[in-house]
Image (cartoon, grey):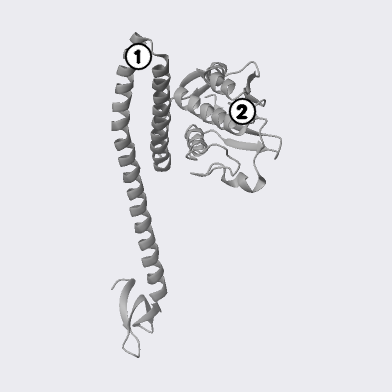
Amino acid sequence: MGDRSTIEGRRKNGEEFPAEAAISKIEVGGQRLLTVVLRDITERKRMENEVRFLADAAQRATQARDEMLGIVAHDLRNPLTAINLAAQVLERQLSEEGAERGMKSVQTIRRCLRRANRLIEDLLDVMRVEAGKLSIERARLSAEQLVFDAVEEQQLLAASASLELRLDVERPLPEVWADRDRLLQVLENLISNAIKFTSPGGRITVGAGPGHGEVRFWVADTGPGIATEDLPHVFDRFWQAKRAQRSGAGLGLMICKGIVDAHGGRIWVETTPGRGATFYFTMPTG
C-alpha cells in the first residue's frame, strides 16, 4: 500500500465510503509494529467532485460563448462585405449622375457598416482580452502626437453634438512604449463615451502629462458624472450607465482596461456626480 493510500471502507450498515489510510512502522523491543490511521474522506471527495464539475461546466460555457461570438462575427462579416461592395457601386453611379439624395443614403449605409464592424471588433477583442491573447505591437511613439491625432479624429463627432473638444498637453512629454492603434482605440472609446454623456454646450478635454517612468493620459467631460454605486462596475463587461441616452454594447470600457493592462499600465476614473467624470490611464515610457 505504501505509506499512504486511498481505500474503500465499509460502515456497520454495509455502506461503502472512501477512506484514507496512513501507515506508520515502528520498532518496539525488537518487534516491528504497524499502526494504521483511517480517515473518512467522503466530504472531501464530494467537494472535489463538485469543484471538478463546476470547472468543467465553466470551461464548456466559456468554449460555447467563444464559439458563438466567433460564429456571430464571421456570419456578420459576409453580408456586411456584400453591403459595402454594393454601396461602392451605388456611390459611383450616383456620383456620375449627381444624385444628392442618393449620396446621403450611401453615407448612411457606410455609417451603419462602420458601427457594425466596430461591434464585431469589440466582440472579438473581448474574447482576446479574456483569453489573454490581445495582440500588442509596441513601438516608440510620440505621446503628444497620439493625443493630437485622437482629438483630430473626434472633432467632427464632437462638433455634431455641439460640444467643445479641447487639447491639454503638459510639456515636455516623453515618448511611450506602446501599440499606436491600440492606444488610439482607448482614446477613441473614452472620447466617444464622453461625447455620449455630455449635454450640448458642454466641454471635453483630452490631455497627457509626464509621470515617473510613464505618461498619464486623461479624458475629462462636463457631463453628469457617475453615481457612486456605479463606480465599481464601470469596467465590467456589458455595463452601461442608467443615464445613457444612446444604447451601446457596453464593451468599450472593458476593452480599454484590457488594452491598458496588456501594456502594463493602469486605468481608473474620478468623478463628482453632477460635475463630470475624468478617465485616466497610464502608458510606460520604456
Front-lying residue, 130 or 150:
150
- Image point 54% across, 42% down: which residue? 240
Image quadrant containing the N terminus: bottom left
What residue type is disc 1 on?
A: Leu
Q: Within 10 Å of the Cα at label 2, are there few (<14), some (14-19), or many (20+) other Cα atoms?
A: many
Q: Residue at x 37, y 80 (%)?
A: 36
- Seen in the picture, residue 209 relative to 118 is either above or below; the reply is above
Tag 2: amino acid: Trp
Q: Quadrant of residue 130?
A: top left
Residue 134 pos. (x, y %)? 41, 35
- Residue 265 visible at all: yes
Which of pointers 1 and 2 indicates the residue nearer the eye?
A: 1
Tell which of 14 and 222 is nearer to you.
222
Residue 273 lies left or right of residue 102; in this view the side is right
- Displayed quadrant of residue 204: top right
Label 1 neighbourhood size at 10 Å, few (<14), some (14-19), many (20+)?
Answer: some
What percent of the width, then of the height, locates residue 24?
37, 76
Q: Is residue 30 above or below residue 258?
A: below
Using the rendered image of the protein, determine whether residue 41 is visible from the camera's viewpoint: no
Dot 1: what SS?
helix
Picture quadrant where residue 11 is located: bottom left
In-image side of 137 versus 175 (left or right): left
Which of the labelled discs sits on residue 94, or is there none? Answer: 1
Instruction: Kindly identify which numbered label has been placed on residue 218.
Output: 2
